[in-house]
C-alpha cells in the first residue's frame, strides 16, 4: 500500500512509526512530515500546500495513494475528507460536518445538552457584554473557551472574575486567537481527575483505546498557562474498569448515536477529554483526531495492525475487529519544549543526542517541532520540540526511563516539566 500522511508534528511522527510497522505498507508520503519521520523506514517527506485540499487530492490521485491518514484537526475541520470522498479516494478521518464536534465548542456543548450527554453547565456568548454579565452572575472559578480551533491554547481556567474578564477581553476584544475567539463558551469549573479516552469509530460501533492523562499547564504542579500538552502517560490508573464502562455507556455510545441522529455520522478517531467527577465522567472537550501527545503513549501500546483498524472504520466493519492493547506495561512521554513557550521563544538551535535512541528497545523520541537546517542538521523549529517517550513494567519504571532519556538530548533553551505522572506514580508506588 502507498499511504499519504497529512501533518508534521509529534502525533504524525507516532502515526508514521506505527503505520510503517504494517506489512501491508510499502511507502508513506508525509506532507510535510518532519526530520523524525524522514528518518523512518518506508517514509518520505514531501512539500504540499496543506491548505489547498484539491491539490492534496490531486497528489493522491496522481501517485496512486491507497489510503490517506489525516493528523491535524485544521485539515479535518476544513473538509479534507469530503474533498477526497468526492474523488473516490480512501481517507481516514471524519467529514467536515462531523469534525465540527471539535471545530466549534458551541456546537459540541449544544449537542451534549440536546442528547443528555453529561458535561458542565455552559453559556455560549456572542459579545463581550453578555459574557461578562454571565461571569458576574455565576462568579469564579469559571472556564473561558474560545469557540473555534486555537491549537489547544484557547482555554482559560479563571480562578477570579478579574481573570475571566481579562480572558474574554483577550479572546473577543483583542482576538488573541483570531476568529476562533470571536465567540466564547463559558462553563462550570469542574473539580476532579482528568483523563483522555480515545476511541475508534465507524459511525455505528465505537471502541475505546487505553486511557491516558495529559499535563496541559506549562509549569510543574499544573501552574502557568495552558499549552498543547507538556507530557502524558498511559494507561491512566484513575480510569478504572468501572469508570471506563460508565464512560462508554454514558458518553461514548451516546455521542456516536447523537452525531448519527444529526445526519453527521462520525468515522475516525474521537478524543474524549473527561473530568472524573463524583457524579461520574463528564465531557470537557471533544477532539476529532488523535491527541498530541496522547498518541505518543497510546499507539506504542496498540497490538493490532493499525491499517486494518483504519480500514474497518472507513468500511463500517469495526465490529469485526478485536482491538488489542498491551495493558501490562506503562508508557510515559515528556515534552522537551523551547523555553518561553507558549508565549515567545527562539528556534533554530541544533539538537544533539538523537542518535542515542537508535536500537534501544522501550525508548522513542517523536519530533514535534524540528527541521533540517541548510547544513542538514536537525534544529528546533517550534514551541514543543520533541516527545521523549519510554515504556516500562509500570508507571514508576516508565517515568524513570523517560526522564533518563531526556538527559540524552541537549539544545539551547531546552525546557520541560519534571512532574509528568509523578502524582499518580506516588499514589501507586
Image (cartoon, helix red, strand yellow):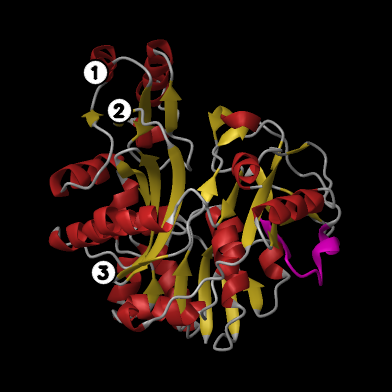
The span shown in magenta is 354-369
Kindly check if marks 1 and 2 are in contact, taking CB atoms under 8 A apart as contact: yes
172 lies left or right of 367: left
| Callout 2 secondary element | strand
Label 1: how many residues lie within 10 Å, few (<14), some (14-19) or many (20+)? Answer: some
Q: Which residue is mark 3?
A: 203
| Quadrant of residue 180 within the rendered picture | top left
313 and 331: which one is in front? 331
| Quadrant of residue 389 within the rendered picture | bottom right
* Position in image of residue 240 (x %, y %): 44, 54
Please tell me the numbered disc located at residue 134: 1
Lower position in the chain sequence, tag 3 or tag 1: 1
**Residue 267, above or below 103:** below
* Position in image of residue 418 (x %, y %): 71, 38
Query: Disc 1 and disc 2: Cα gap in Å?
Result: 8 Å
Please tell me the numbered disc located at residue 182: none
- Could you tell me if residue 288 is visible in this image? no
390 lies left or right of 88: right
Lower position in the chain sequence, tag 2 or tag 3: 2
The residue under the point 43% across, 75% down is 58
| Callout 3 secondary element | loop
Label 3: how many residues lie within 10 Å, few (<14), some (14-19) or many (20+)? Answer: many
Q: Which residue is mark 2?
A: 186
361 and 161: which one is in front? 361
| Callout 1 secondary element | helix
Query: Disc 3 and disc 1: Cα gap in Å?
Result: 36 Å
Amino acid at each position: 500500500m502507498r499511504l499519504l500522511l497529512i501533518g508534521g508534528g509529534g502525533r504524525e511522527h507516532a502515526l508514521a512509526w506505527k503505520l510503517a510497522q504494517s506489512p501491508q505498507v510499502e511507502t508513506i508520503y508525509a506532507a510535510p512530515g518532519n526530520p523524525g519521520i524522514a528518518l523512518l523506514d518506508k517514509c518520505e517527506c514531501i512539500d504540499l500546500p496543506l491548505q489547498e485540499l484539491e491539490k492534496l487530492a490531486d497528489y493522491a490521485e496522481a501517485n496512486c495513494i491507497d489510503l490517506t491518514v489525516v493528523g491535524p484537526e485544521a485539515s479535518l475541520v476544513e473538509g479534507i475528507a469530503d474533498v477526497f470522498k468526492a474523488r473516490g479516494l480512501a481517507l481516514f478521518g471524519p467529514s467536515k460536518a462531523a469534525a465540527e464536534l471539535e471545530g466549534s465548542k458551541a456546537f459540541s456543548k449544544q449537542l451534549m445538552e440536546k442528547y443528555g450527554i453529561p458535561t458542565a453547565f455552559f453559556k455560549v456568548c456572542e459579545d463581550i457584554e453578555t459574557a461578562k454579565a454571565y461571569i458576574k452572575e455565576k462568579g469564579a472559578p469559571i472556564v473561558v473557551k474560545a469557540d473555534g480551533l486555537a491549537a489547544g491554547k484557547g482555554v482559560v481556567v479563571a480562578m477570579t472574575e478579574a481573570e475571566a474578564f481579562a480572558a474574554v477581553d483577550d479572546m473577543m476584544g483583542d482576538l488573541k486567537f483570531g476568529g476562533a475567539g470571536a465567540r466564547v463558551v463559558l462553563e462550570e469549573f469542574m473539580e476532579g481527575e482528568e483523563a483522555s479516552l480515545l476511541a475508534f469509530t465507524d459511525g455505528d460501533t465505537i471502541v475505546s483505546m487505553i486511557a491516558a492523562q495529559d499535563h496541559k499547564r506549562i509549569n510543574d504542579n499544573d501552574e502557568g498557562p495552558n499549552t498543547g500538552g507538556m507530557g502524558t502517560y498511559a494507561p491512566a490508573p484513575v480510569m478504572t474498569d468501572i469508570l471506563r464502562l460508565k464512560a462508554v455507556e454514558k458518553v461514548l455510545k451516546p455521542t456516536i448515536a447523537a452525531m448519527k441522529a444529526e445526519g453527521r455520522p462520525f468515522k475516525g478517531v474521537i478524543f474524549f477529554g473527561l473530568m472524573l467527577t463524583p457524579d461520574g465522567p463528564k465531557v470537557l472537550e471533544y477532539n476529532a483526531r488523535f491527541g498530541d501527545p496522547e498518541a505518543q503513549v497510546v499507539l506504542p501500546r496498540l497490538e493490532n495492525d493499525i491499517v486494518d483498524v483504519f480500514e474497518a472504520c472507513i468500511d463500517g466493519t469495526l465490529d469485526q475487529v478485536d482491538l488489542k492493547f498491551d495493558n501490562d506495561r506503562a508508557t510515559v512521554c515528556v515534552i522537551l519544549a523551547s523555553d518561553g513557550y507558549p508565549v515567545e521563544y527562539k528556534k533554530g538551535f541544533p539538537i544533539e543526542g538523537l542518535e542515542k535512541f537508535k536500537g534501544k528497545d522501550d525508548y522513542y523520541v517523536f519530533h514535534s517541532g524540528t527541521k533540517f537546517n541548510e547544513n542538514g542538521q536537525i534544529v528546533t523549529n517550534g514551541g514543543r520540540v520533541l516527545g521523549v517517550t519510554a515504556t516500562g513494567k509500570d508507571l514508576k519504571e516508565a517515568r524513570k526511563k523517560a526522564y533518563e532519556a531526556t538527559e540524552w538530548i541537549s539544545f539551547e533553551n531546552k525546557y520541560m516539566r519534571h512532574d509528568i505522572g509523578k502524582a499518580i506514580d506516588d499514589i501507586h508506588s
